[in-house]
Image (cartoon, grey):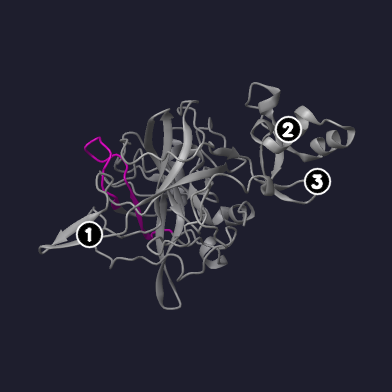
């Protein structure tokens, strides 16, 4: 995706790829990261390696990353959150818990009146949509994935947006942009019958860390477990124009296969013209029968696991495409007589080129991962 927007200068810490949340030997909450990225434990290792500290370091290990090329990078430790609370931030301290999901009505509420038909979203439609920004060089930034805000501190996206064989090792997950519509404008405005209507400016929030599902394998052609969450360095609870999308927590929604349902997908990805869109676009896709989708992808020896994946689309020229990865597949459900948007899926992969008739896009089924998401959210 094209590289637009302001740069963020007042941060020095790079974002982390974490391996999950954890408890250290003192039962303190933390995140599982490489020991070279945990200053607190690294200092113990390098400067104060007593017998007690050696035992503490051993007990703090939370796994190994076999894909790394050195012992220092392979060893994973539980780095306590209390030693990370002084990280650079530009926000007022917010007490909204980061490990709580909003209730339907608080989440999934669309700000615009629904417009049937048309490709371009309303200026404030789908207020949970996110753009993930990468630093590709010391002074170059770009948006290459999407996501959706799920509470005041977390964004849902795809696992391949964090780690993918085609992603250069030098790229760094950097920030999340929220409240965006047209990435060439700041602020976003439209003119209707001579009346100018503008919305609140977008915000860029630095990424604290990101966690891909532990069973996601970037090199797997089937792309099972292609899901991840990103923790924001600052809470966005005070921004009333940013509304999270709901997750399918209730049993009747998380277990629904939604076969035949029409769902919305939105993003700034590649269009039929072969270039990314500066404006947030939307399409409507129908969910396929799982068996039909499995038979379609068997042609290329690709397995579809209907317990963890779902298929939608398959109409000529109507599809998600490069740059839309990680965005939500959205379904409307009635809750207490209100229409509420839920994230039913996460954009994973599809045919190349995009929009081939008879070939649906493949989405990670969010309902199968709600427990994992909740378990890996910290306050």
Estimate the x, y position of residue 57 in percent, counting from the top left: 79, 36
Q: Residue at x 26, y 58 (%)?
A: 123
Instruction: Pinpoint residue 212: horizontal percent, then vertical percent.
Output: 56, 42
Q: Residue at x 77, y 33 (%)?
A: 44
Residue 22 against residue 261 in the figure, above or below: above
The answer to whether residue 350 is seen in the rendering is no
Mark 2 — residue? 43
Of labels 1 and 3, earlier in sequence is: 3
Mark on residue 25? Answer: 3
Nearest the viewer among 340 and 345 is 340
| Circles 1, 3 touching at the beta carbon (< 8 Å) | no
Q: How many marks?
A: 3
Q: Is residue 270 magenta?
A: yes
Task: Tell me where the magenta segment starts and ends, as one range.
Answer: 259-282
Report the disc number at residue 155: none
In percent of the image, x 63 and y 40: which residue is there? 19
Residue named by callout 1: 117
């Amino acid at each position: 995706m094209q590289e637009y927007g302001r740069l963020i200068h007042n941060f020095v810490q790079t974002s982390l790829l974490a391996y999950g949340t954890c408890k250290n030997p003192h039962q303190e909450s933390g995140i599982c990261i490489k020991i070279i990225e945990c200053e607190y434990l690294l200092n113990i290792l390098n400067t104060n390696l007593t017998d007690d500290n050696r035992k503490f370091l051993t007990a703090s290990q939370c796994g190994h990353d076999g894909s790394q090329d050195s012992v220092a990078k392979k060893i994973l430790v539980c780095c306590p959150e209390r030693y990370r609370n002084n990280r650079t931030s530009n926000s007022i301290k917010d007490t909204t818990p980061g490990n709580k999901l909003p209730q339907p009505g608080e989440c999934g509420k669309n700000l615009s009146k629904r417009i049937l038909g048309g490709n371009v979203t309303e200026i404030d439609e789908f207020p949970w949509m996110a753009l993930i920004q990468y630093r590709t060089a010391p002074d170059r930034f770009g948006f290459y994935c999407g996501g959706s805000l799920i509470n005041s501190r977390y964004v849902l996206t795809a696992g391949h947006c964090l780690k993918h064989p085609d992603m250069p090792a030098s790229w760094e997950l950097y920030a999340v942009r929220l409240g965006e519509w047209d990435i060439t404008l700041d602020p976003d405005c439209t003119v209707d019958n001579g009346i100018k209507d503008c919305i609140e400016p977008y915000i860029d929030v630095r990424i604290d860390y990101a966690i891909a599902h532990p069973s996601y394998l970037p090199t797997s052609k089937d792309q099972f477990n292609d899901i991840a969450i990103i923790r924001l360095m600052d809470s966005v609870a005070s921004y009333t124009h940013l509304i999270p999308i709901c997750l399918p927590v209730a049993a009747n929604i998380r277990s629904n296969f939604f076969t035949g349902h029409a769902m919305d997908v939105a993003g700034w990805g590649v269009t039929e013209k072969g270039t990314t869109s500066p404006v947030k676009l939307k399409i409507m896709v129908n969910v396929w029968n799982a068996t039909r989708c499995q038979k379609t992808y068997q042609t290329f020896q690709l397995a579809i696991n209907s317990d963890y994946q779902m298929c939608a689309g398959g109409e000529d020229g109507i599809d998600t495409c490069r740059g839309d990865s990680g965005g939500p597949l959205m379904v409307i459900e009635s809750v207490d007589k209100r229409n509420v948007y839920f994230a039913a899926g996460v954009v994973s992969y599809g045919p190349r080129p995009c929009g081939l008739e008879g070939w649906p896009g493949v989405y990670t089924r969010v309902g199968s991962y709600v427990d994992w998401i909740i378990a890996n959210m910290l306050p």
